[in-house]
Amino acid sequence: MSKEAKLGWKTMPIGGFLLEPGSALKYKTGDWRAFKPLVDQSKCINCLLCWIYCPDAAIIRKEKFIEVNYDYCKGCGICANECPVKAIIMVEDKK
Amino acid sequence: MVQIMGLTGDEAIAYAAKQSKVDVVAAYPITPQTIIVEAFSEYVHNGEVHTEFVCVESEHSAMSACIGSSLTGARVFTATSSQGLALMHEMLYIASGLRCPIVMGVVNRALSAPINIHGDHSDMMGSRDCGWIQIYCENAQEAYDWVLQAFKIAEDPEVLLPITVNIDGFILSHALERVEVYHDKDVENFLSFRNSTLKLDPDTPFTVGALCFTDYYFETKRQQAEALKIAPKVIDKVNSEFEVLAGKKYSQMDTYGLEDAEAAIICLGSTAGTAKAVAKDLRSQGKKVGVIKPWVYRPFPCDQLLEATKNLKALAVLDRAYSPGAPYSALCSDVVSTLYQNGKQLNVFNIVYGLGGRDITPMDLHAIFNETLEVAETKAVKEPLKFVGVRE
């Protein structure tokens, strides 16, 4: 979750309205995670199946392998399940 | 300038909605609906109004359509009753949560089972905590007057909350009464078009109904609490403006005979009319009795109740709904909480009456007044909650 100061009831818009678009970017959902995907970049064949399957668009494409955006990765494990070369493993996310 | 019309409670509410020039009415036209939307659909059919009338497939959808319309800045009205209100329950919270100033006529009727169509307050009391402002009327005239005022209160930028205007099923909804209606022009001067600063519009898009978890939900509810706290001030203001139009002054609480009463009845809706007639009779015999009728039930008029009860020695609280398993029914819980919170000692007892449309007669009220006088005398409440008018 974002560490920025949150608005109080006196200052925030009524009704839970979001008056500007793009606020989902500020909502760091990474702290929902119980398990964390770890990528073994030496095994990664850059097939991008994880990138396709990730429901949170939390896979970052690099030239030869992928990385995980931990700000938004909720730790669902779909990437690890889909990886054909088992380059991604899920480990307990100790915070 | 007024015109006299013969209107049922339902028709009086529909007529007020017509004069309020509502933009959208969404309703589900089947039992338990009311003649309110039936009468309004005739205005639409006759071309007397320019309202978008949406026939939906359930009360749940009716309120959903009302919410969507209200968010675009439209003035929105609907009506329901009994099971219909119960089916709307989920959407009632969304209407208040999204701060939609919808006005809804509610014809108070019993909830099943057993199946029943007659008047009691179980339906509205079941949705009491939905965050709406709730107004109860004694007769068709009050229903007409309050609907006109309700739009102005609901749409005030400091309030922005939906309002129910409640009338007793059949007793008021279907009984023909003399109603003084005001000229369209005068109503227009009192109630201009809704001026919404924040509305869904292609030019000013914003997000409605986004997820508010542990981090923002509580603040949103706190804002609603604040709006209800501010509402009495706005209600007072609108009551004063309405006085200019109507020549009569409403407030949050109506009282009768309280200048010297020692024993009183407090109740909601049409029962207050019968109670006043009985009180008048008893007062002519020198008995010091009075009647208190909250017009506004939510937000509860605590200050007015304290003022009204300051010289009383006993108070009977009449509830036309029962809170199963609770120490008192809804109205009595509010009365006792208000008195206790302010350290006021008063002998209060609760009477549950009229469930499923069971009549409350002048004789019943006569007996209740006498019992209240006895409690004032002996300073002892025998039964804190009792049922009146039920066979043993």
Image: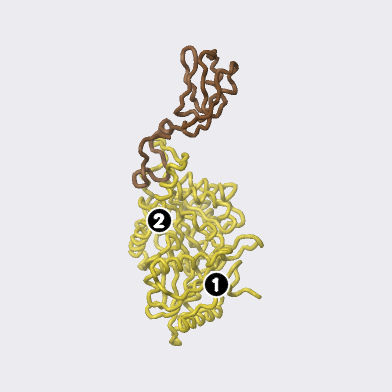
Chain colours: A brown, B yellow
C-alpha separation, residue under disc 1 versus residue under disc 2: 29 Å
The type of residue carrying mark 1 is Leu
User: Which mark is nearer the camera, 1 or 2?
Assistant: 1
Give me the residue at 54% from left, 81% from top.
B367
| A6 displayed left or right of A80 | left
x and y percentages locating residue B371 in the rendered image: 51, 81
Say which quadrant the N terminus of chain A sits in: top left
Residue A24 at x, y percent in the picture: 44, 32
Name the spot of residue B149 as percent of width and height, x first. Answer: 40, 59
Q: Can you tell which quarter of the image residue B111 is in? A: bottom right
Q: Amino acid at mark 2?
A: Leu
Q: Nearer the viewer, residue B42 or B225?
A: B225
- Mark carried by residue B228: 2
Q: Tag on residue B174? A: none
- Asked if B323 appears above or below A88 in the picture, the reply is below
Q: Chain of mark 1?
A: B
Residue B323, given in percent of the width and then of the height, sits at 56, 64
Work out whether residue B72 or residue B99 is closer to the camera in this orientation and state it: B99
Q: Which one is earlier in the sequence, the residue at label 1 or at label 2?
A: 2
The local crowd at label 2, few if under 14, some if 14 to 19, many if 20 or more residues have their Cα within 10 Å, is: many
Q: Chain of mark 2?
A: B
Residue lying at the far front in this picture: please name it. Answer: A94
Q: Secondary structure at mark 2?
A: helix
Instruction: Say which mark, if any, is on residue B385.
Output: 1
